[in-house]
Amino acid sequence: NAGVTQTPKFQVLKTGQSMTLQCAQDMNHEYMSWYRQDPGMGLRLIHYSVGAGITDQGEVPNGYNVSRSTTEDFPLRLLSAAPSQTSVYFCASSYTRLAAYNEQFFGPGTRLTVL
Amino acid sequence: SQKIEQNSEALNIQEGKTATLTCNYTNYSPAYLQWYRQDPGRGPVFLLLIRENEKEKRKERLKVTFDTTLKQSLFHITASQPADSATYLCAPRHYGQNFVFGPGTRLSVLP
């Protein structure tokens, strides 16, 4: 199993550009989520999905879109990049959100810089 | 609103000593509490969890306690080694809720 994979690992954008961060998991997990991690702020939830075709907003959703057409893939789209979106982005998955004992598996992260 | 605090942003200890990290939460009634380790440039990795009705859980050199009255979990690393240097995150969990993580404590074990 590859676990959770993310691409790209690094990205530099100019303000106003759009891009998609890719995330895939091969563990047949229902629950997938995107976080951003900033110094002193910890992990903050952007969007999440509890299954194919179902997505919802987290704590900091503005400026981001997601879709979940398959169980495996959960891409994150930046619509019009802003310097405030400079951060490290992590995708994570878990078997289900319902069971509080299920741990999350994280991808390696994408370091995004917006100039 | 739910709030999670971890005792300090950074903790330095000498090799061989026991490191103790604290996780406090408010406006929560977690059924479980999970601990993760994060190395620089990597995603967090799950270490262990403890249930609300368990007072203590051990895994090798790791020990976790959970006091639902104090709304606190303590994470201990005994006989610490430089390889234990990392950031440690706690995540109180309840059924059907999204994961919420504490800000983390950066542990440095000095040789």
Image (cartoon, rainbow, N blue to C red):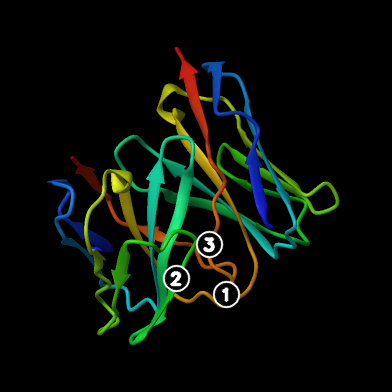
Q: Same chain, marks 3 and 2?
A: no
Chain letter belonging to callout 3: B
- Residue A26 lies, in percent from the top left, at 26, 72
Tell me the quarter of the picture where residue B7 sits. top right
Q: Residue at the location (45% across, 12% down)?
A: B111
Give whichever of A13, A74 is nearer the camera.
A13
Q: Same chain, marks 2 and 1?
A: yes
The numbered disc on residue B99 is 3
Chain letter belonging to callout 2: A
Which amino acid is tagged 3? Phe
Q: How many angstroms separate mark 3 from mark 1 (CA)?
A: 11 Å
Left or right? Give the position of B91 relative to A56. right
Badge 3: residue crowd in 10 Å (few <14, some 14–19, many ≥20): some
Q: Residue furthest front?
A: A16
Q: Residue at the location (35% across, 48% down)?
A: B43
The numbered disc on residue A57 is 2
Query: From the viewer's perspective, is residue B6 above or below residue B29?
Result: above
Which amino acid is tagged 2? Gln
Which amino acid is tagged 1? Ala
Chain letter belonging to callout 1: A
- Residue B2 lies, in percent from the top left, at 67, 56
